[in-house]
Image (cartoon, rainbow, N blue to C red):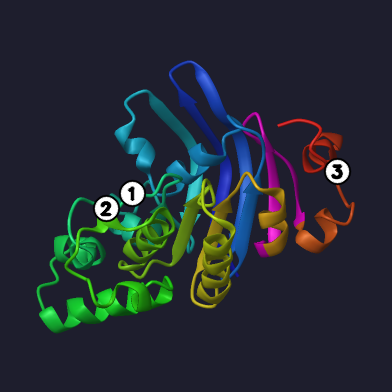
Amino acid sequence: MKKIEIKNLSLNYGLRNVIDGLDLDIFSNEIFAIIGPANSGKSSLLKCLNRMTDFITSARVSGEILLDGESIFQAQDSTYLRRRIGMVSPLPVGLPMSIRDNVTYAPRMAGEKDTDRLNFIMEDCLRKAALWDEVKDRLDSLATKLSGGQQQRLTIARALSHYPEVLCLDEFSIAIDPVTTMKIESILMDLKKNMTIILVTNVINQAKRLGDRTAMMLNGKILDLNTNHELFNGNIRDKRTKEYIEGLFG
């Protein structure tokens, strides 16, 4: 079942074209990986999906994005949309408040006041992010004191506090140790049972390990899109995809 349908999407920052007439379907309960060199439009695509481009004065978006068949531009309140499509940025930093307040911040801003409900959300999301056992005895400690890997998982817990239908991760593996990366990858495999995950990664093997399907982007276009089994076993349409996967450029 299609969760997101992208039709003829283009994005310009001023005169610079970043995404160029892109068509793409993303399915429910899949991990959809996007690979490609820097400045190929990967992160900008994620910004379009939850309308972060609204905050960029030079951004001009055209085309259509449908979430469950409904236009995100015409029929969606942008705040509500960002609860449905969560985002984890590439450089995770805990908010300058307690671990507890980091995870409950979004629900509180959305109007949730019930303490028991907020405590449930906090524990549930920290457990899903494989962080609960490490922080349960210091929930009122400053989140910025956590290690880098813990802060990465905290940003996932924070994104999960909306109970989103789609979770976008923008190069989340940057500067994380291998053990933490393995923990997060295990988390994502479990989370996809209840949501769609869009993973932008600069690590080819990570896309290969996690993705159900992988797309190769370059210059705002998709060069290749296939199941991981097909793509990483040589069923490639564009030679530049093969060259990128083999590390010849990028």
As measured in the structure, the alpha-carbon distance from the residue carrying label 1 to the one carrying label 3 is 39 Å
Instruction: Using the rendered image of the protein, determine whether residue 43 is visible from the camera's viewpoint.
Output: yes
Q: Residue at x 70, y 63 (%)?
A: 209
Pointer 3: what residue?
Answer: 237
| Percent coordinates x, y for residue 240 in the rendering | 81, 34
Quarter that holds the C terminus: top right
| Percent coordinates x, y for residue 105 in the rendering | 19, 61
Q: Earlier in the sequence, mark 1 or mark 2?
A: 1
Q: Is residue 139 above or below residue 222?
A: below
Q: Secondary structure at mark 3?
A: loop
Q: Say which amino acid is labelled 1.
A: Val
Pointer 2: what residue?
Answer: 144
Q: Residues within 10 Å of mark 2 (few under 14, many from 20)?
A: some
As measured in the structure, the alpha-carbon distance from the residue carrying label 3 to the one carrying label 2 is 45 Å
Quarter that holds the N terminus: bottom right
Pointer 1: what residue?
Answer: 93
Q: Residues within 10 Å of mark 3 (few under 14, many from 20)?
A: few
Residue span colored magenta: 210-226
Nearest-to-viewer mark from 3 and 2: 2
Nearest-to-viewer mark from 1 and 2: 2
Q: Residue at x 82, y 63 (%)?
A: 229
Indicate whether residue 212 is drawn in magenta.
yes
Instruction: Using the rendered image of the protein, determine whether residue 212 is visible from the camera's viewpoint.
Output: no
Most foreground residue, 123 or 136 = 136
Indicate whether residue 247 is drawn in magenta.
no
Q: Residue at x 48, y 25 (%)?
A: 12
Q: Secondary structure at mark 1?
A: loop
As measured in the structure, the alpha-carbon distance from the residue carrying label 1 to the one carrying label 2 is 7 Å
| Percent coordinates x, y for residue 249 in the rendering | 76, 30
Report the side of 202 relative to 93 (left or right).
Answer: right
Q: Say which amino acid is labelled 2.
A: Thr
